[in-house]
Image: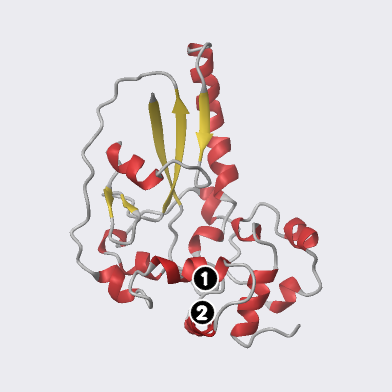
Amino acid sequence: RTVLCALFPYYSTPTAGNVSMYARGRDYHAVIHEALDPLCEALRAEFPNSSFEILTDDSPLPEVLTGCLAGLGVIGKNGLLLHPERGSFHFLGTILTDVDFSAPMREPTFCSNCGACARACPVNMDKSRCLSGLTQKGGDLTEEEEALVRAHPLIWGCDLCQLACPANKNLPTGCAAFIDNPIDTLTPEDLDGLTRRQFNEKFAGRAFTWKGPRPIARNLAIKGESTL
């Protein structure tokens, strides 16, 4: 009956590195659940016969549209939610409930389509070739995909369209969990000889571990940085 939406900013001043800004801090799935759990417990105490379920990212819910309808921002040409003060460098957390809170639903709104994100994107916003997706793709890449990864500044994720977006100028810093103790660079030595289990243990609580070490090792090799 109701979806409660919350933004979790992760912006920090861009620094050198080959890992996307979203994956440099703690895994956002865990952080969002830790933050929203107390709220769910309080709501369950007040509505003991109702359900409250936390979702983030890996769900059938169209999060960006949901955030827009909740009044948290506009939908950008790059498909991200643009908050008027926090830009697009944020994660979305949601709570689904069967309680009807009778909140007004906004009309979907969109950015001014200035084109800055498209100009910064090497594949002109073609989602089927998105660099963020390609760097995380399992298995072998095609020659064209390898060329795109080779020319890309990162080996995991992509920040190009967000860094070019006018909505992301002069942003305040994000939540401490996402900017403290960052891992901004991964090297062949970081992965050398590690099984998937060892890799996940070494980098526990980091979002870039979900596919294991193989895609990262492959991307490093494509860039000629692998010593394996």
Left or right: where 160 falls relative to 197: left
The alpha-carbon separation of the residues under discs 2 and 1 comes to 7 Å
The residue drawn where x is 38% and y is 23% is 1
The residue pinned by badge 2 equals: 145
Q: Is residue 148 left or right of residue 83?
A: right
Q: Earlier in the sequence, mark 2 or mark 1?
A: 1
Q: Nearer the viewer, residue 21 or 59?
A: 59
Q: Residue at x 29, y 65 (%)?
A: 165
Disc 2 and disc 1 in contact, CB within 8 angstroms: yes
Image quadrant where one finds the C terminus: bottom right
Residue at (56, 30) in percent of width and height: 37
Q: Residue at x 57, y 66 (%)?
A: 136
Residue identified by numbered label 1:
134
Q: Looking at the picture, how far across and down is residue 149, in whole percent? A: 52, 79
Q: Is residue 119 above or below residue 69?
A: below
Q: Left or right: 196 with respect to 55? A: right
Amino acid type of disc 1? Leu
Residue count near mark 2 (Cα–Cα under 10 Å), binned few <14, some 14–19, many ≥20: some
Residue nearest the viewer, comparing 163 with 173: 163
User: Which type of secondary structure does the marked residue at label 2 adopt?
Assistant: helix
Image quadrant where residue 225 sits: bottom right
The secondary element bearing badge 1 is classed as helix
Residue 95 position, x and y percent, is 46, 31
What is the basis of the colouring in this image?
secondary structure
The image shows residue 84 at horizontal and vertical percentages of 26, 49
Question: For residue 208, which numbered disc appears in the image?
Answer: none
Q: How many marks?
A: 2
The percent position of residue 68, horizontal first and vertical second, equals: 29, 43
Query: Are there few (<14), some (14-19), or many (20+) residues within 10 Å of tag 1?
Result: many
- Three-letter amino acid code of the residue under disc 2: Glu
